[in-house]
């Protein structure tokens, strides 16, 4: 399929504090190669019945200065800071994701992509600035992303302040070594929830408050 990419997302996520930000950035500038910043706008989608959330998937359209893509993250595994999830990306110019552009064989039994696509609605938005580094450690390449922004759901807001380490290529053991190196200096708290999970929780709280 044109413009489609897929890869298992292997990452470690940690929570930051205001006091840690400058020190973490300075440390990364010494140990990794600074890549730059991106302003990212993410819009998450589901059906009125919650078909996406029910299958522990995350569906979004992400936009940045010169591009956009729709992404589906399937149910995977999570253990504290570590997560491993199948992820599929397709370039897009649309306002609503088209699930039929993803491979046919990724869906749970009984999930009809075309039917679900026809009733998708935006649920919440996540805006953040992403500062990037590329860290070569051992035989591996690791992307380090510092995300700072907010989740917005029906007027309710929640801050995002996270550090993510994603294995771009190489050995899982090198990703663990990188995380241990950071933790030895900063004692970071694990980020146990994805942005999508936090968004749906915020949406549920706001919906209850509006009743």
Image (tube, rainbow, N blue to C red):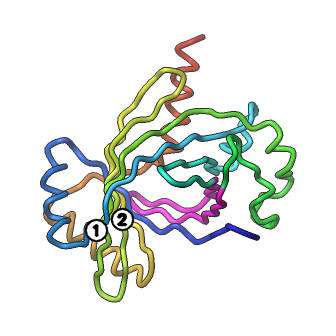
Horizontal side, residue 132 vs residue 170: left or right: left
Q: Do the residues labelled 1 and 2 touch (CB within 8 Å)?
A: yes
Q: Earlier in the sequence, mark 1 or mark 2?
A: 2
Q: Which residue is drawn at 31% across and 66% down?
A: 35
For the residue labelled by badge 1, is the local secondary structure a helix, a strand or a loop?
Answer: helix
Residue 175 location (% of width, % of height):
35, 75
State whether residue 178 is above or below residue 101.
below
Q: Does the magenta stretch include residue 53?
A: no
79 inside magenta stretch: yes
Considering depth in this image, is 162 or 208 the residue closer to the camera?
162
**Residue occupied by mark 2:** 165
Which residue occupies the extreme front position in the image?
Answer: 66
Q: Is residue 76 visible to the viewer in this orientation of the structure?
A: yes
Which residue in the structure is indicated by mark 1?
179
Badge 2 element? strand
Q: Which residue is drawn at 42% across and 73% down?
A: 167
Instruction: Write down the region rendered in magenta.
Output: 70-91
Q: Classify residue 73 by image quadrant.
A: bottom right
Q: Residue at x 52, y 33 (%)?
A: 201
């Amino acid at each position: 399929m044109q413009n489609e990419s897929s890869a298992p997302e292997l990452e470690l996520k940690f929570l930051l504090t205001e006091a840690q930000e400058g020190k973490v950035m300075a440390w990364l500038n010494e140990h990794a190669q600074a890549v730059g910043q991106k302003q990212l706008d993410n819009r998450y989608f589901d059906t009125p019945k919650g078909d996406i959330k029910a299958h522990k998937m995350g569906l979004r359209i992400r936009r940045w200065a010169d591009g956009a893509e729709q992404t589906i993250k399937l149910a995977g595994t999570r253990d504290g800071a570590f997560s491993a999830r199948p992820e599929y990306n397709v370039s897009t110019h649309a306002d609503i994701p088209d699930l039929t552009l993803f491979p046919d064989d990724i869906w749970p039994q009984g999930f009809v992509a075309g039917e679900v696509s026809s009733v998708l609605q935006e649920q919440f938005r996540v805006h953040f600035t992403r500062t990037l580094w590329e860290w070569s450690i051992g035989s591996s390449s690791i992307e380090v992303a510092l995300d700072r922004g907010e989740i917005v759901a029906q007027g309710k807001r929640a801050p995002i302040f996270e550090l993510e380490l994603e294995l771009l290529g190489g050995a899982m053991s090198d990703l663990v070594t990188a995380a241990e190196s950071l933790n030895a200096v900063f004692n970071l708290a694990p980020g146990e929830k994805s942005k999508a999970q936090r968004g749906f929780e915020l949406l549920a709280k706001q919906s209850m408050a509006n009743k």
